[in-house]
Amino acid sequence: MKTLFLKYHIEILVVLAALLFITTRHPDSPYDKMIGSDGKGYYAYLPAVFIYGDLNYDFVESYERIYYEAIDDFFDFRIRTESGTINKYFPGVAILWIPFFLLAHVASLLFGFSADGYSLPYQLAIGFAALFYLWLGLKFLHKILQHYKIEDWLSVFVIWIIFFGTNLYYYTIEEPAFTHVYSFALINVFSLTVIRLSKNYQPIGVLLLSITLALIIIIRPVNGIIIFAIPFLSGTIDNLFRLFKNILNDKRTLFSALTVGVAVLLIIPIIWLMQSGQFLVYTYGDEGFNFRASHMLDVMLSYHNGLLIYTPVALISFAGFYPVFKQSSHVRITLFTFLLILVYIVGSWSVWWYGEAFGMRPMIDFYFVIAILLGIWLKFISSKKLIFSFTVVVLVVLTGFNLFQTWQFKNGILPAKNLNQATYWENFLATTPKARVYMDDVHSRCIQTFFTDMETNPGWLNYTSKSSEFAFSGQYASKIDFSNTYSIGFRENISSFLADNNYQVVVSAMAYSGNDNCSAQLVVDYLDQAENSLSYNTFFLHEFLSKNRWTQIEFAATIPPEILNDFILAVYFWNPASDERFFVDDIKIEIWEIIDE
């Protein structure tokens, strides 16, 4: 049994990952699709080419309404230019998805699903594609660890830690349409190929190296920096020189490899030419690299997705530098140089936190380095039982912690936006979401505030709900019960101090419920002058409140841009349950202007 586990542990891990995928994801829901966010852009090449014959992506509105319940506001990957419509994202992952897409298309035709590229078989196909490339990446990672003479039982431990103890888990199970598990697989293929060519030159290896590198680049061009790892992967300076000498001397193979690699790379400008009539297009707008101001320290330590905060097993792996530094100056210098280049370039991107991400996601692609260092360290201390046992326990605990933080992020307990030191520690080890809004005070500003502590009347409505029976501050709170189902409320035309911009209404208050499952709701309603609702927003409070305890609640609602010129803002609490007692105090309403997104 032990021998079988050692032999098939990667397959066992992937089967376990598949079970987690099947049991935790709900692709029939419009809010839990496999193809989502950036993945919509990566994926769109496939239905555009194989189903619709439409590289202008005019089919987007149709699938958004059918499968994502979108009306006008949805994630749009299309860049409109004077000469055509361009996909913001690169097509590399779509190439890797082709077999899975075609299988899903056949299954849709055979079993009565809509063969439109977005029905259930296509969603599942992307989820299982991520699992396949996870398997491929881990298989090659295992062979890389074997090269460093990491014993099988240690290799098993390292590989399971790399999956469950890092955000590779999240970007395989929860976000399978992102590029990272695919880049992880290809970079491991590239790395092992360099290692083998350095020891034993074979022409087929050069061809594989060229094709793999080209695919890596057309998935995420910045990942071409893997070439800077070649000196480290070669092992010695002699191996490095011999590798380049063999490649340069084998001119026929070199020419073939370059031809194939360039052909793969030309896929991008050919698609751009078909879409816009131009060979070269920059699709990322204001986003770009600033190499004069890299956020290297933030990449590693920031509470806003920093590597060591959200993937702490990486910190333990750095202990592997000690035996590496002792054994080989070549490996020491080349590995440190590669990591320095990697962190520098990752931190030079203008959006260095990489959006609403879980952890420093671009580093996932290069986790072979963490695996190597971790394996070398565990091998080095394997004879020191106390240190080894302590390290194993710490790694297991940190893996559990990573899974817990993954669960927190998935369930909105760790906020996806505006993570910082305060918000991180406020939610540290929390198991229930907090009704809080974390506004980005760099890219937005509060332009107006309305407040009542119930002690005086600022001209709000329904002051008959004011009660001295119970209060959070002062003597009074607004009481909601069978006799009055509405709280003190705000109603005012606020259009006069709004310009043509994006705005959010942020409402905060202290709330108290005398019941376990409170039915109270916060309502933010936008009304026309006849007091007809233009956009009604309701927030249910039961999951945030504890019985017989004052709790701060905070929610935000976007003001629809089309109503800015003339509307009435109404804010109030409502409890339709006549047998409950609910109090609210210190209601504050803030109007935030989004000045730079």
Image (tube, helix red, strand yellow):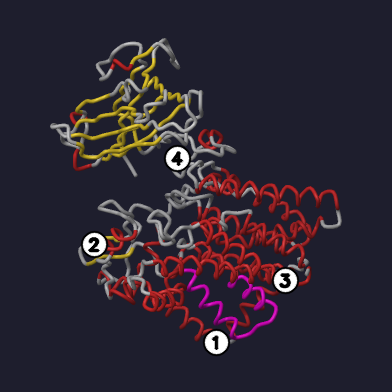
Q: Secondary structure at mark 4?
A: loop
Which secondary structure, mark 3? Answer: helix
Residue appearing at x 81%, y 55% in the figure: 381
Q: Which residue is mark 3?
A: 147
Rounded to the nearest whole Å, what is the CA distance between mark 2 and mark 4?
31 Å
- Could you tell me which secondary element the residue under label 1 belongs to? helix
Question: Where does label 2 land, which residue?
Answer: 81
Q: CA distance from mark 3 to mark 2?
A: 50 Å
> Which residue was labeled with disc 4?
418
User: Where 109 falls versus 526 (above or below)?
Assistant: below
Residue indicated by mark 1: 253
Of badges 4 and 3, the one in the foreground is 4
Q: Depth check: 545 or 68 in front?
A: 545
Amino acid type shown at disc 4: Asn
Measured from the top left, where is residue 18 in percent x and y?
A: 56, 64
Q: Nearer the viewer, residue 402 or 431?
A: 431
**x, y percent for residue 174:** 50, 56
Q: Report crowding for label 3: few under 14, some 14 to 19, many 20 or more residues within 10 A (C-alpha).
A: few
